[in-house]
Amino acid sequence: MVDQELVNYLKDGISRGYDSAFLKKQLLDAGWNVKDVDEAIAGLDSEKITTQGIKEGKKGFKWMKIAGIIGIIFFILEIVLAGYWLISTGGGLTDQGISIQNPSKFVVITISILFLIMLELYFFGFVRMGKKTESGLLKFSGIIFMLLPIVVAILGYIGYTTMNSVSNNMATAFTGAADLSEILSPIYTIFTVYIIFFVIYLIVQFLFSFGLMKIKEKVKFSLTSGIFHLVLAVATTLTVGLFAYIFIKLKGMSSEELFGLLMSGGGDLLSILSIIKIIGYVMIVVMPLATLFSSLALLNASKNFE
């Protein structure tokens, strides 16, 4: 006799967009007898239930598939840029930089808008994934990640204008016409804002990582993706902490001490910057892997739910 509890579970799962093979695996992993599960599947009116599942669970635009494809594009770009940086700069061990001709404002604006749209679509895919898998963590962190690029653009513009203003006033400090601490004050202010922003980003990054790992039974590659994102979150935490230490130390110095530090070539701060550089190498390796497995998770979720 077919177990009605199994039939109800299968009907509910199919109506949500899961296929019978996935539901069967879930039941077997939970300890159900394979014969009972097979009888329950065979006893379903497969055509009626499958049609209902397609209508209710797999309707609408395939946002997660689009997000996954965009993620693959990001992965390729990250590999190309990381390789180009390592080749052109010797891994950061030389003073040579990446040489790029100054593009026109139209090109910069066009690329920036296109990149922003792609980012929004990419993170919207995780919002959809969180909704389909009933993961509040993933849905919430995905929404916040959609807002962060806009905040980054605003903070980047403010930082750029602040640095230009400070650099124009540096000459007066070296001539003794102005106090160096006062000139650097705007940098301290914007850096404080940056630290607050990164703290918020880190909280969301940890939530995002845990959200991905939590749905490992529903979406392939989500566990691996979550682990790589967790490594990125830890590495970013260490980097922000070290920069915050440098910031606090510099802010507490007098003008004479700052001049002395500049004349000595950085002092013990150089060792801290070396640690930050090593962490940066780790992030260069981990970031493309996190993007790759996140994209694969999006494509698998699209296959299961869209």
Image (cartoon, rainbow, N blue to C red):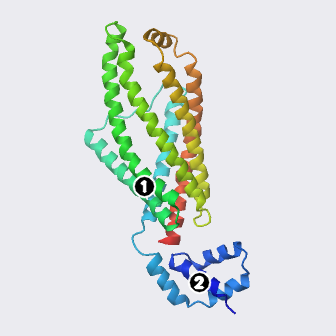
- Which residue is found at the position 59% from the left and 84% from the top? 8
> Which residue is at the far bottom?
1
Amino acid at circle 1: Ile
CA–CA distance in space, label 1 to label 2: 33 Å
Q: Give the quarter of the image for residue 18.
A: bottom right
Secondary structure state at the residue bearing disc 1: helix
Residue 242, given in percent of the width and then of the height, sits at 55, 29
Q: Is mark 2 on a helix, strand or loop?
A: helix
**Circle count:** 2
x, y percentage for residue 291? 52, 52
The mark nearer the N terminus, 1 or 2, is: 2
Residue drawn at 48 percent across, 85 percent down: 51
Answer whether residue 94 is visible to the viewer in this image.
no
Residue highlighted by disc 2: 8
- 83 or 163, which is in the foreground? 163
Is 56 left or right of 114, judged from the image as shown?
Answer: right
- Figure check: 272 above or below 233: above
Q: Which of 4 and 122 is in front in this view?
A: 4
**Disc marking residue 143:** 1
Q: Where is residue 286 in the image (x, y as percent from the top left)?
A: 58, 45
Q: Quadrant location of residue 236?
A: top right
